Amino acid sequence: MPPDLILHHGRFTTLFPGAPEADAVAITDGRFSAVGAASDILPTRGADTRVIDVGGRRVVPGLIDSHTHVIRGGLNYNLELRWDGVRSLADAMRMLRKQVAITPAPQWVRVVGGFTELQFAERRLPTLEELNAAAPETPVFILHLYDRALLNGAALRACGYTRDTPNPPGGEIQRDRHGNPTGLLLAKPNAQLLYATLAKGPKLPAEYQENSTRHFMRELNRLGITGVIDAGGGFQNYPDDYAVVQKLADAGQLTLRIAYNLFTQNKGAEAADFRAWAKQVRPGQGSDHFRHNGAGEMLVFSAADFEDFREPRPELPADMEGQLEEVVRVLVENRWPWRLHATYDESISRALDVFERVHHDMPFRGLHWFIDHAETISERNIDRIAALGGGIAVQHRMAYQGEYFVERYGAAAAAHTPPIARMLAAGVPVGAGTDATRVASYNPWVSLSWLVTGKTVAGTQLYGEDALLDRETALRLWTERNTWFSSETGTKGQLAVGQLADLAVLSADYFRVPAEEISRLESVLTVVGGKVVHGSGGFSDFAPPLPAAMPDWSPVRSFGGYASSPAQAHGTDPADAPHACGVHAHGKAAWRRPVPVAEEPTFWGLLGCSCWAF
């Protein structure tokens, strides 16, 4: 039976034992049917086989984000002005002013995380005065990590915040000397105030939410992501807020594989949530594109130790253990995997006390449970997790908050935060992700750069050589190792016969570019289940068309998502920028790269080209 698709003339990194490299793959019925030499694979093509020459580029298994908030992010993506990757505050404010000018009342302009003030050349956030000058009438909300939000006067009025509005527990509405809110909201240390304020903004209607979710998925595809594990989130109710992605799944319009965890929404009634959900859905229920994955990352509100390294470590309440134990017993009884948000070793110790007690009475027997984040986890607790058969999912939050951590705890403490090499040495399943879209960017290449270089996005060197990962190990944490966290080991994550045919053709060679260039990588051709879901440059004709972003004033129309191109990074509308070459497939920034003699598209883009792209 001839294959449906053949990709050849590439450097294919399979991550499969015994056959780490190939120069061609064949795909039949959504799975790899052959991986190996082009001389063996090309003769198998039939009259209907699509054959794509990838031009000598590096090809890797599709990236998998083991901790993100893609469902919530998709519902709101078209509303958000992203400062992810923008390198100066001046450029960010130019973007904001342009968006303010076209945003109709009563809509807000929202910059909802994914950046840090330290990525800007100015190394600061805008002042409230600058914000009010840029937007005197249009509400503006800017979320910075977990620590603060900036609101202009119009946003304060839209939220109804006045001198009589009390501070909520764990949060502070900063006030002037007359007691009036200034527009600065602080997590002290709980981010609930920030997220509750954001939730007051207008939402998109269902049709626009579908469009928004499709655009967000395509943005992730552009970066080489083919699968995610959604960690739920506050104000993300099941099943109502899952209806859009379920509809897209039913229509065959998902371009990501999504495994979703259920996040309790009811403080004090968490066990009741999970008992009810256990009657509605079971782990693994769904399809290869959309499936249930268990509980968390919030199991009980009392166990959440939100990380804000500008604030002291939060002390969990004394009744946490009893509440957590009740929920974990419900999960084990129903054979539900779970994940638990835990930043600090002190919190992890107390959670493990509970897990060990439950395991003694109700053996976990292979349940895939894991700790999320674990920035300051101790060696002892790593070993305790290993003994219980658990895993650890790490994210690149330190790439955005590393400087704040050093300021509070010192460089020595930061040098192994989180201690990934020690986790791997202990044999614990370890996977990588982003915790996007608010506390860090969804760009996987920023995470991979952090894992390999040990540097923050602002360039601070956090880790020594002993804590760095080699490029292959880092890539494995983003591919085949992440399949353990969705109980899909062996079904995807490698370029291997029989596995789901997910891959990314990269803009430059991940294994050869200078380390400082890793964060600038993206995919020029992304395939999910044998279907092309993204193409750019010379591969753009292979990608299916995507409807324009809705509404027509959406920031996505003007600025796209992560600012990977010079035009986006400097606040320019990409529509006004030169287009990438459609003949040789080189990118707009090719001139910034070292001469890649083995990569014809980038080589021509670097030297100048008769297509007049520059």
Image: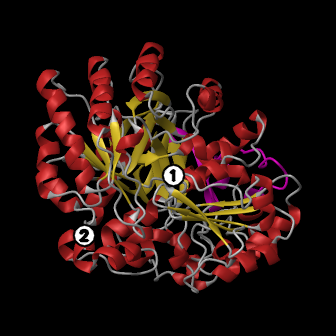
Q: Quadrant of residue 323?
A: top left
Quadrant of the image for the N terminus?
Answer: top left
Q: Is residue 305 left or right of residue 417?
A: right
Q: Earlier in the sequence, mark 2 or mark 1?
A: 1
Number of disc labels: 2
Q: Residue at x 14, y 22 (%)?
A: 361
Distance from the alpha carbon under mark 2 to that under mark 1: 39 Å
Q: Secondary structure at mark 1?
A: loop
- On the image, numbered disc 1 is attached to which residue? 169
User: The C terminus lies in which quarter of the figure?
Assistant: bottom right
Q: Is residue 380 above or below residue 55?
A: above
Q: Residue 544 lies in what quarter of the image?
A: top right
Q: Position of residue 203 (x, y in %)?
A: 74, 43
User: Viewer-proximal residue, 459 or 606?
Assistant: 459
Three-letter residue code for mark 1: Pro
Q: Residue 468 — which label? A: 2
Q: Is residue 513 visible?
A: no
From the viewer's perspective, is residue 460 above or below residue 369?
Answer: below
Using the rendered image of the protein, determine whether residue 498 is visible from the camera's viewpoint.
yes
Categorize mark 1 by other alpha carbons within 10 Å: few (<14), some (14-19), many (20+). few
Q: Secondary structure at mark 2?
A: loop
Q: Amino acid at mark 2?
A: Leu
* 524 magenta-colored: no
Which x, y percent locates residue 478?
36, 52
Viewer-side residue, 232 vs 409:
409
For this orientation, the residue located farthest to the top is: 279
Q: Which residues are magenta?
A: 528-557
Report x, y in % for residue 7: 47, 48
